[in-house]
Amino acid sequence: MHEALIFLAAAVICVPIAARLGLGSVLGYLIAGVAIGPWGFGFIGDVDSTQNLAELGVVLMLFVIGLELEPKRLGSMRATVFGGGSLQLAMSGAVLMGALMALGLVWQAALAGGLALALSSTAISTQAMTERGELDTPTGRAAFGILLFQDIAAIPLIALVPLLARVETPGGNPLWMRVGLAVAAIAGVVVLGRYFIRPALRLIARVDVRELFTAFALLLVIGVAELMSLAGLSMAMGAFLAGVLLASSEFRHALESDIEPFKGLLLGLFFISVGMTIDFGLLASRPAAVLLLVAGFVALKFASLWAVARLLDICRERWLFAALLAQGGEFAFVVFGVARESKLFSAEWEALLTITVALSMALTPLLLLLHDRLTARGTKIERAADTIDAQAPVIIAGFGRFGQIVGRLLLANDIRAVVLDHDPDQVESLRKFGYRVFYGDATRLDLLEAAGARRARLLVNAIDDVESSIALVDRVRANFPDLPIVSRARNVSHYFELKLRGVEVAERETFEAALRVGRSALERLGIDRFRARELADAFRRHNIASVDATLPFYQDEARRMSMAKQGREELEQQFARDRERFEREHGGAGWK
Amino acid sequence: MILVILAHPYPRRSRACAALVEAIRDLPEVEIRSLYDLYPDFDVDRAAEQAALARARLVVWLHPLFWYTAPGLMKHWFDEVLVRGFAYGPGGDALAGKDVLWATTTGGDEWAFSEAGRHQRPFDAFVPVIEQTARFCGLNWLAPFVVHGAHEIPDEALRDAGRSLRERLVAWRATVETRNA
């Protein structure tokens, strides 16, 4: 409890300040970590136990990113992941290995160190890309593909280190068994995702206890991560895989909004823990060596990334690409640790390289800031278009008998819509017909956010339950006051409730259909079809006017009753006058 | 009060009519009723339309020329609003003495409206039906305002057209005021 207090207080103080100064949230968290860590005020003694929890933040982040990537899109990323990733690892690795050899390391140590330094921080660069809305751009996709490849490559790299030192891994399995385990674990996650998780989610959703769904979502992510780690694979990669498998499911937005707060907090904790591990004692005793190492490392990595960007045909944003990935990653810490244990590195080198990587992470937000200063033009416009393009202009809440007709009219005219429905069975059957419907309670603020309510142009409220329908309107009016609402009304009092809340359009659901039936009845009784339409039009006009006239006295039942009675009399008189006129003009005599 | 009865089926797609409307929108005491926006289902509200006419001193019928006459909803408006007992016949003097200005935009150029042109008649030959509709209701017929070749007219010429329509309305108001004074 005490530690939680410190973490939360440090974050709440440091992050807004950093954000205000335009440094980004990551640097704020890092500074918070430095402040409370052993080299700051020393509030937190046990850095390791924090790190374990913090790693969950990275895992959840990769899960959410996976959720946003559908398998189809992932397939089209294959070339960037494997082509771009291996190219980057080879180029950056070779350059950094050369530099380490020049500093006097033997080639085995330089190879391990160079490859480890070539890895970038998934957490830092992805967070930076998310904050900048860069994930969906070509540059962002290339960078993310490379990060994915690094996550995959880190595992064999860690296994490679003891081999380079010619020391047997302590208590390790033979290589074939490790590969077999890894393949089995991945296959297991795919099978689970396909055949088990979705039905389980459906079952849980039907229970309709909200926190149970959240609990299951967390259980799911942590379970998959644990499974991968047992097989010796990266937990983050496992979570990513699980996310991708659920990306096309109806639970995508619900999962996203449930996991999001945990992800944000734990990721913050992760950055704090990185800040805490920075060894300022070493920086104080050998400032020149450390600073030179950091500068040299970032410069070399930046240059090699720029060259990779050239080879990958990233034409406009090479500088951004290099700045995003120019830091060292979390895996480097692990590799350095293993390298020291297997006597490949001296303790001194491990400490030096670890602080280099940690400082390079802290440098990333500054590097990005510098990049923005130097290329102040051009990029902004492109990014704005991208984000708008990535979302639908219409949100449809409720896709039952009513919402479907509205939705199909829009969809048939190429108007994209995010469709939400809270009935898992309904969602399942609609998905069979090929509709992209998402499961979730549309009255929830986080789900509305995930559906893009902030930038949508219209909300169609087709929810059948009066209470939920009104709750949705209240939520939208409070949080997205600029989002116009077109709404279904179950009955007159629902219509009043909607109108009182300023809903732009409210349509009584039975009114038009009943008028239509009334018209048909008139036609059957021998009245000309166009005349029947005119009569129905007149009725509609009068009815809407008198209902709206009673709106101010909605609560006053007696008053409403008398007004309604008066309205009926007016209508009768009006129809009588109209009939008279009609007979006079079209009474059979005359030229018509 | 000047009442503009605008009949363009797709006001957002309109160029020529929209330019004319924009040119006069900010004049004082102008009411613009866009029929296709008010009655997309053709359920013209006779009472509301007759009340608007009663308020007006000058009525402007503004529309693109469809088949040598007004678009369907405008014709329907004539049928529904200009009825016996309001516009003509016993007690039908609601419009008597008011002025009417017919403003229309055409697709063909002026030459197309000639004996040798595509429409085989000068434009004047197509005026009488609308003109007599107005006269039958006791409206004073003003010289029509016509913009030819509206689909390819340059922006500059369109702006000029808007300006001259505006000048006509301003001049009309001035003469009415001197007459009253």
Image: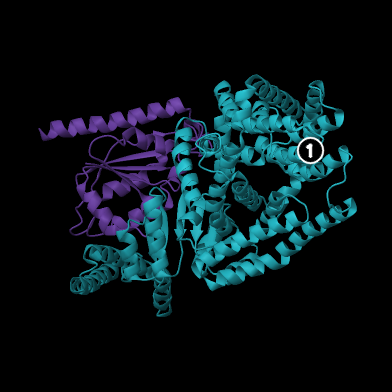
Image coloring type: by chain
Q: Residue tagged by mark 1?
A: A339
Q: Is residue A160 left or right of residue A329?
A: right
A534 or A378, nearer to the observer: A378
Under tag 1, what secondary structure? helix
Q: Amino acid at mark 1?
A: Ala
Which x, y percent locates residue A456? Answer: 48, 49
Which x, y percent locates residue A417? Answer: 54, 54
One can see residue A166 in this view: yes
Q: State the purple chain.
A: B
Q: Is residue B62 above or below residue A464?
A: above
Q: Residue at 34% of width from left, 28% of height from top?
A: B163
Q: Quadrant of residue A492?
A: bottom left
Q: Residue at 79% of width from left, 25% of height from top?
A: A100
Which x, y percent locates residue A296? Answer: 70, 22
A122 or B69, nearer to the observer: A122
Q: Is residue A58 above or below residue A224?
A: above
Q: Is residue A11 left or right of residue A315?
A: left
Q: Chain of mark 1?
A: A
Which x, y percent locates residue A557? Answer: 21, 73
One can see residue A435 in this view: no
Q: Residue at 54% of width from left, 48% of height from top?
A: A264
Q: Colour of chain A?
A: cyan
Residue occupying the far left of the picture: B181
